Structures are given as structure tokens and as C-alpha cells.
Image (cartoon, rainbow, N blue to C red):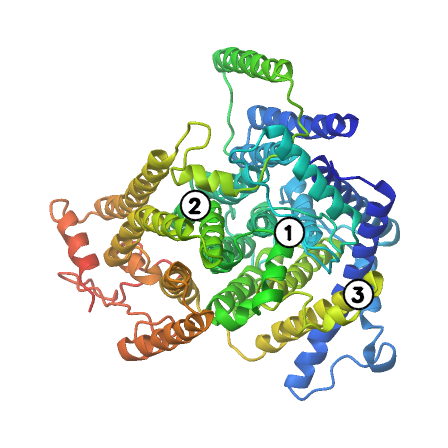
């Protein structure tokens, strides 16, 4: 697999050279007149209040966590899908043993994935997938006015 | 060991970049022309005949405009983000098969064979494959689909880095929205491809094309998977109706707010390259790649054959690119809760049901057309369900007025807008 | 293979340099981004060794998934522009000893591999053997069926725990906002269970 990595490395370096050449060219031809106004945060002319690096909503984190779980699940999908696909192709070509093997992998996979689906159904039922509703459940009176 | 030819490789890579960059330029022109056409305007028509030199003028402006770096940004990541975004979009092009003359070798079985024999067999098939003319930069990659998928999941970093380093509230909000959107839609994307793998039994993109050449295009048998795939890649590319990260009415420019000049240009380049890659992928995985009803086999000369295949592939890709532009002016933007609802409550369950249907069809060796019927049936059932029960993402979300025991005066709503 | 060594040296340099960046950087977010490059470098090593599936899975699960989660987590906790991490000398010492131990372990393992006579260019077969061993088909006396199913249960636990944590946060908000504490739990349940 040296060829693969080498190719990607060459691709990356050519791309990098391309970008750097462009940046250098841009640096040479473009004007550079910094001013205090240009260095300010753009907020449509308003003076920004506070920093943007704030603690943000937890819902984004929950989405990311759900994503990781399903991502791991999909990563397990791929080898299984190849095995199942090959087995059913062999079965279509007339190998009866392959048919029963495919059935076996089918059931195994249903168990594997079914367990996670239980969790997914639970989350759905409890309303954790609702973007707006999960917010309304929060209802801290002090925060209802906040934007 | 595949023979490794530096010179050819450099030429091919330089060729790809030289083809992609102008394509991106003219894609922006096409974008504006199609917009104009949809809205009954003329579009850019001043620079060159029919505005054909407009991309050159735009490119020149990217170089000539001042690139102020605001004082408040995190400078390293601010400059790194556009490069990351563009690099990832470009590398994905390396695995797309543009047309080949010999099918890729199958993976070698390991059961009951001597390891040395396996290695020898692998080397032989790979060697024979490497000698033939294949229009793919990284040939014989066994896990092509997986790599494209992996690179797609990296695209989120350009957005996160750009938004976070800008220290601008619009940027941060835009990048948060965008990253949540990109990761949510990656799941239906992956699942819709699994349905294809169950048929083809390989992750190799060329292998998938070979299967379609023999049995017919996947879009015929799995139209639902194609639809899910297409919607997901639209969301991944931040294209309308999913362009919430850059929703200009509310977020100015989203994560791009503080960028200007060439840094902005690199983000745009990455975005449009991503569009090209995903269009190619749609073509390769669902629309038969470079095959067109046996037309590509009429040409027997290997070089001309490769050219014809490449032309077929490019034509199909062009159609999907046109669709990208057309959809932009057809479907209005989603609201963020609708967007997340669509991913988690519509597309993921649908893709799961579809996957189950594919598994059953394969297991009981039913006709592929049964799957077409199931696909259409699932789609219609989802539509009927959404209309009948009214919980679809396009209906109003059920915001509830919270009944607190003694509501304080002046605080009626219990819902905080996001 | 000379080219392989050069490539490995490049990948190893990237991986090691960014790993040092993780340890040395004082900003949490910067550390997270350095970790990102470390993981990409490791994926590159996997590809170099011919473990295509492992490399792609590393990219998908760790780089594309877990790191997004970590960056989000860092952003959630990161109060103020740069939450500054100051490493105490004791922590440097402990970390240094642990890193040294790990280095010795890995070096021993690598040298054993060299003496086993295999070369990095031995191509590994496709991903179906991986799938087969997940599904419990004996491959060289190893069956991974049980771990495969246990992974699923593990994911379920994480899923439910994540949902629970997200809700616990909400309850904290309610408590903080001065609501009566006793009925909070039931309240939340009721609201979430009933769909109008």
C-alpha cells in the first residue's frame, strides 16, 4: 500500500504547493492597508458585547454523541455488508451452503443492530430527538427571555 | 507491489487540478446563469461574450482584494481552516474512477491457502491490473467507498476551525449549525450506501460500476437509497435547501463572515469541489458510472474507450451539477429544527427500513424489481404518514405552551427561539 | 523498500510532532486540534501497512466522529477565550515516565516484528475476512462473535447514558432557577412522555 500513501502524499504536496503559490502571488499583488476598523469584529456595525467563545447549547453535544454511536455502528456495517453481499451472490450462483450462511449472518446482524435500535426508539419516545421540545422542557424561568 | 511512476502521477495530478479549478470557476458562472434563467434575468453578461470570462475576473479579484486578518482571530487556525477545507475536497477526487479498461482484482480468499500463495496471487492480479490503463489516480483501492465517506466526515473540520477561530458570534453559530448538520446527515449517507454494498459485495468503486454494468443501474432498484443519498450530500455541501450555516438573513455569512479575499476563495473552491466530488459519486454509485447501455463497449481501442467512458461520466456528473443549481432556486430553506428532524426522524428510519428491505430481498433471492416496488412504497408510505399524522418535519413542530403553576406576568412563551 | 521508509518517516514525524503539540499546548482547543493531526497520522500508518479498512475506520470513527465530539466538548467547557492549562512539574514527571514506558513497550513490539521476518509490503486481504471474524467464522482459531455483540450492548449503554446526562443538565438548570426540587424529576418525565 506504499503506492496509495505515496500517491496521496504527492497529491497533498502538489495541492499545498498550489495553494502556497497562490497565497504568495496574492501577497505580492494585493494591497495591504490595515486600519483599526478592519481589525474589529464584524457585527453589522454594532459594538460587539463580550467574546464569541461562549459555552454553547448542550443539544449540539448530544447530537455529536448520537452521531458517534451511529458512526461506529456504520463502521461495523461495512465488513458485514461485504460478507453478506458475497454470501448471497454465491447463493445465487448455486451454493446452498452460502444461503444458510447468509441467513446466519442476517440474524446475527439483526441482533447487533436491534440492540442499538432499542436505544434509538427509547430516545425518540423520550423526546430527546426533538430539537424544539427538548428546549421547552428546560423552562428555567430566568432563561425564557433570553434569545 | 504496484509499480509506482512519479512522472505519470505528477502529470495526472497536475491534470486533475488543472481541470478541476476551471471547472469550479465555470460552475460559479453556471450557478449565476442558472439563477438568472430561473428568475428570468440575464445574469452576468459584461465580461467577455455571454459573460464567459466572468470566472477569470472573479479569480483576479480574489488575488487583488486586500485580505485583512482581524486582530481578534486565532491566527493559526484562521489561516489553516480554508486550506483544510480545500485539501480534503481535493483528495476525495483521487479515488473516483474516471473510466477503466480492466475490472479490478477481487479480494483474495485467505481460507485454506498458503499465505505465500495469497501474496503471490494478490501481486499477480494487482500487477495485471496496474498494467492496464485506468482512469483513477489511486487504482485498486479496496475500500474506495469507505475512503470517500471518511474524507467526507473530515470536511466538518474546515467549518469548525473557521467558525471557532473567527471569534465572531455569527461565525460560531454558523459553524455549530453546520457541523451538527454535516454529522447528522452523514448517517443516512452511509446507510444508503450500505444497501448498494449488499448487492455488489465490494467496497471498490470500480467493482460497483462492474456490477451495475452487468445487472443494471442501482437507481433502478434502489431509488429511495439514491434519494436519501442525494439529500444527504446536499446537506453535506451546505447547499440550499440546507444552507443554514450561511443563512445570510440571520447569520450574515455564517462561518465565512470574517473571511475575505483568497481565504474566502479557498473555502468556496473547497465547497464547489465538494459538489463535483459528490456528483461524481452519485453517478458512480447509483447511475452506472461510465457505463451507458453498452455504448462504451462499442469502442474497442483502449485509449478511445477510456475517453468515451470519461465523457459519459462527465456528462452524467454535469447533469447532477445542474440539478444542484436548479434545486437551489426551487426549494426554500429549512428551519434548523426541521433540518434536524428530517435527518433523525425521517431519513435515518427510512434508510433503516430500506436496508432491511434490501437484506430480505437478497436473503430470499427475490427479483431486484421487488426492491424497486418496496422503495417506492416506503417513500409513499412516509409521505402518507407525514400528511396523516402531521408530525413530519415540514409541518409546524409541536411547540407546547408550558403551563407553569402561576405564570409570572409578561412571560407567556415557554419556548426560547434558537 | 526505501520509499516506504521515507513515507513512514514522514507520517511518524507528523504524528509525533502533533502528539508533542497536544501535550505542550496550553489551550484546550489547540490541544484538541493537534490530537486531530495525530489521529490522521496514525490512519496514514495503517494505510501504509495495507490495513485499508482499519485506516478508513480510524478516519471515520476517531477523526470524523470522536474528535468532533471532543471538539464540541472542549467548546462547551471552554469558558473564556483560551482556557489556559498549566502543567505542573509533577505532571510533567509522571507523564514523562508513562510516555517512556509506552515507548519501551512499543519499541520492543516493533523490534519483535522486524525479527519475525514479515515485511510491511505484505498485502493484507480485503475486508471480508474482518467481517467473517466478526460473524464468528473461525479464522486462525479466533472468533470475535461475542465481542461483536458486546460492542452493540456497550453502544446502547452509552446512548442511554448520553440521553440521561443531557436531561440531568436540564434538571440542574431547573434547580438553579429556584423551582421546587422535589417534584422536578416527575415533572420532566411527565412532560417528555406525553405528546399532545
Q: Count the marks: how many?
A: 3
Residue at image point 56% right, 24% down: C23
User: How dense is the environment of label 2, judged by Cα within 10 Å: few (below 14), some, or many (20 and up)?
Assistant: many
Residue B228 in the image, given as x and y percentages of width and height:
48, 66
Read off the residue under disc 3: B305
Q: Assign a secondary structure to mark 1.
A: loop
Relative vertical location of residue C162 with respect to residue C109 in this rendering, above or below: below
Give the quarter of the image for residue C36.
Answer: top right
Sequence-wise, the earlier of marks 2 and 1 is 1
Q: Chain of mark 3?
A: B
- Determine the CA span between mark 3 and mark 1: 57 Å
What residue is shown with label 1?
A40
| Left or right of B27 on screen, residue C124 | left
Q: Nearer the viewer, residue A141 or B50?
A: B50
Image position, residue B177 (x, y; %): 49, 57
Q: Position of residue A90 (x, y in %)?
A: 48, 53
Q: Chain of mark 1?
A: A
What is the quadrant of the N terminus of chain C in the image? Answer: top right
Using the image as rendered, state which of residue C196 and residue B10 is in the foreground. B10
> Under tag 2, what secondary structure?
helix
Image spot of residue B10 (x, y percent): 84, 46
Mark 3 vs mark 1, foreground winner is 3
Q: Nearer the viewer, mark 2 or mark 1?
A: 2
Which residue is labeled 2 in the image? A68
Whether labels 2 and 1 belong to a single chain: the reply is yes
Disc 3 and disc 1 in contact, CB within 8 angstroms: no
The C terminus of chain C lies in quadrant: bottom left
What is the residue that sits farthest to the bottom in this orientation?
B40
Q: Are marks 3 and 2 on the same chain?
A: no
Amino acid at each position: 500500500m506504499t503506492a496509495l500513501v505515496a500517491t496521496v502524499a504527492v497529491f497533498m504536496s502538489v495541492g499545498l504547493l498550489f495553494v502556497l503559490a497562490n497565497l504568495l502571488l496574492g501577497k505580492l499583488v494585493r494591497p495591504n492597508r490595515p486600519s483599526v476598523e478592519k481589525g474589529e469584529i464584524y457585527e453589522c456595525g454594532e459594538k460587539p458585547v463580550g467574546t464569541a467563545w461562549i459555552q454553547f447549547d448542550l443539544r449540539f453535544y448530544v447530537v455529536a454523541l448520537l452521531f458517534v454511536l451511529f458512526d461506529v455502528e456504520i463502521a461495523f456495517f461495512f465488513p458485514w455488508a461485504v460478507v453478506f453481499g458475497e454470501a448471497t451472490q454465491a447463493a445465487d450462483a448455486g451454493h446452498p451452503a452460502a444461503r444458510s450462511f447468509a441467513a446466519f449472518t442476517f440474524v446475527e446482524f439483526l441482533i447487533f443492530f436491534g440492540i442499538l435500535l432499542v436505544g434509538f426508539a427509547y430516545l425518540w419516545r423520550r423526546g430527546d430527538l426533538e430539537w424544539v421540545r427538548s428546549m421547552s422542557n428546560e423552562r428555567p424561568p430566568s432563561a425564557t427571555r433570553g434569545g | 507491489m504496484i509499480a509506482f511512476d512519479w512522472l505519470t502521477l505528477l502529470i495526472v495530478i497536475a491534470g486533475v487540478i488543472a481541470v478541476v479549478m476551471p471547472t469550479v470557476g465555470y460552475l460559479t458562472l453556471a450557478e449565476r446563469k442558472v439563477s438568472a434563467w430561473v428568475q428570468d434575468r440575464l445574469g452576468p453578461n459584461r465580461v467577455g461574450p455571454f459573460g464567459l470570462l466572468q470566472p477569470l475576473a472573479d479569480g483576479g479579484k480574489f488575488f487583488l482584494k486586500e485580505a485583512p486578518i482581524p486582530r481578534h482571530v486565532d491566527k493559526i487556525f484562521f489561516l489553516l481552516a480554508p486550506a483544510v477545507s480545500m485539501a480534503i475536497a481535493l483528495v476525495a477526487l483521487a479515488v473516483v474512477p474516471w473510466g477503466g479498461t480492466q475490472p479490478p482484482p477481487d479480494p483474495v480468499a485467505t481460507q485454506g491457502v498458503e499465505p505465500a500463495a495469497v501474496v503471490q496471487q494478490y501481486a499477480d492480479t494487482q500487477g495485471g491490473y496496474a498494467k492496464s490503463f485506468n482512469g483513477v489516480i489511486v487504482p485498486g483501492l479496496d475500500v474506495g467507498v469507505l475512503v470517500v465517506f471518511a474524507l467526507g466526515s473530515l470536511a466538518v473540520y474546515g467549518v469548525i476551525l473557521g467558525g471557532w477561530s473567527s471569534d465572531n458570534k455569527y461565525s460560531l453559530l454558523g459553524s455549530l449549525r453546520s457541523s451538527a448538520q454535516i454529522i447528522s446527515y452523514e448517517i443516512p449517507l452511509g446507510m444508503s450506501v450500505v444497501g448498494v454494498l449488499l448487492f455488489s459485495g465490494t467496497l471498490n468503486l470500480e467493482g460497483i460500476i462492474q456490477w451495475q454494468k452487468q445487472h443494471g443501474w442501482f437507481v433502478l432498484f434502489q431509488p429511495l437509497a439514491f434519494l436519501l443519498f442525494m439529500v444527504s450530500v446536499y446537506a453535506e455541501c451546505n447547499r440550499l435547501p440546507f444552507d443554514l450555516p450561511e443563512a445570510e438573513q440571520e447569520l450574515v455569512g455564517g462561518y465565512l463572515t470574517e473571511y475575505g479575499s483568497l481565504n474566502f476563495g479557498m473555502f468556496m473552491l473547497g465547497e464547489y469541489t465538494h459538489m463535483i466530488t459528490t456528483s461524481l459519486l452519485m453517478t458512480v454509485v447509483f447511475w452506472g458510472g461510465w457505463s451507458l447501455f453498452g455504448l462504451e463497449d462499442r469502442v474497442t481501442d483502449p485509449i478511445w474507450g477510456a475517453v468515451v467512458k470519461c465523457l459519459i461520466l462527465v456528462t452524467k456528473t454535469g447533469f447532477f451539477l445542474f440539478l444542484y443549481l436548479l434545486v437551489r432556486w426551487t426549494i426554500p430553506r429549512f428551519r434548523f429544527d426541521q433540518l434536524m428532524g428530517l435527518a433523525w426522524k425521517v431519513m435515518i428510519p427510512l434508510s433503516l427500513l430500506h436496508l432491511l428491505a434490501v437484506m430480505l430481498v437478497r436473503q430470499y433471492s427475490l427479483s431486484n424489481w421487488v426492491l424497486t416496488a418496496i422503495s417506492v412504497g416506503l417513500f409513499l408510505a412516509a409521505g402518507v404518514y407525514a400528511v396523516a399524522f402531521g408530525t413530519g418535519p415540514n409541518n409546524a413542530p409541536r411547540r407546547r405552551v408550558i403551563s407553569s403553576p402561576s405564570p409570572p406576568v409578561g412571560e407567556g412563551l415557554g419556548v426560547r427561539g434558537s | 523498500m526505501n520509499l516506504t521508509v521515507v513515507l513512514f518517516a514522514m507520517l511518524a514525524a507528523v504524528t509525533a510532532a502533533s502528539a508533542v503539540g497536544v501535550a505542550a499546548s496550553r489551550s484546550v482547543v489547540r490541544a484538541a486540534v493537534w490530537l486531530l493531526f495525530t489521529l490522521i497520522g496514525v490512519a496514514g500508518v495503517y494505510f501504509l501497512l495495507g490495513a485499508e479498512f482499519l485506516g478508513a475506520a480510524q478516519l471515520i470513527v476517531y477523526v470524523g466522529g470522536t474528535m468532533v465530539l471532543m471538539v464540541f466538548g472542549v467548546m462547551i467547557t471552554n469558558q473564556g477565550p483560551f482556557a489556559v492549562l498549566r502543567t505542573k512539574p509533577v505532571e510533567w514527571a509522571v507523564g514523562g515516565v508513562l510516555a517512556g514506558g509506552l515507548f519501551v513497550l512499543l519499541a520492543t513490539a516493533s523490534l519483535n516484528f522486524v525479527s519475525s521476518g514479515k515485511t510491511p509490503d505484505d498485502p493484507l486481504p480485503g475486508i471480508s475476512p474482518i467481517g467473517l471474524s466478526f460473524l464468528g467464522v473461525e479464522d486462525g482459531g479466533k472468533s470475535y462473535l461475542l465481542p461483536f455483540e458486546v460492542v452493540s450492548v456497550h453502544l446502547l449503554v452509552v446512548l442511554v447514558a448520553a440521553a440521561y446526562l443531557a436531561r440531568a443538565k436540564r434538571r440542574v438548570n431547573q434547580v438553579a432557577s429556584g423551582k421546587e426540587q422535589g417534584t422536578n424529576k416527575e415533572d420532566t418525565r411527565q412532560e417528555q412522555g406525553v405528546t399532545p
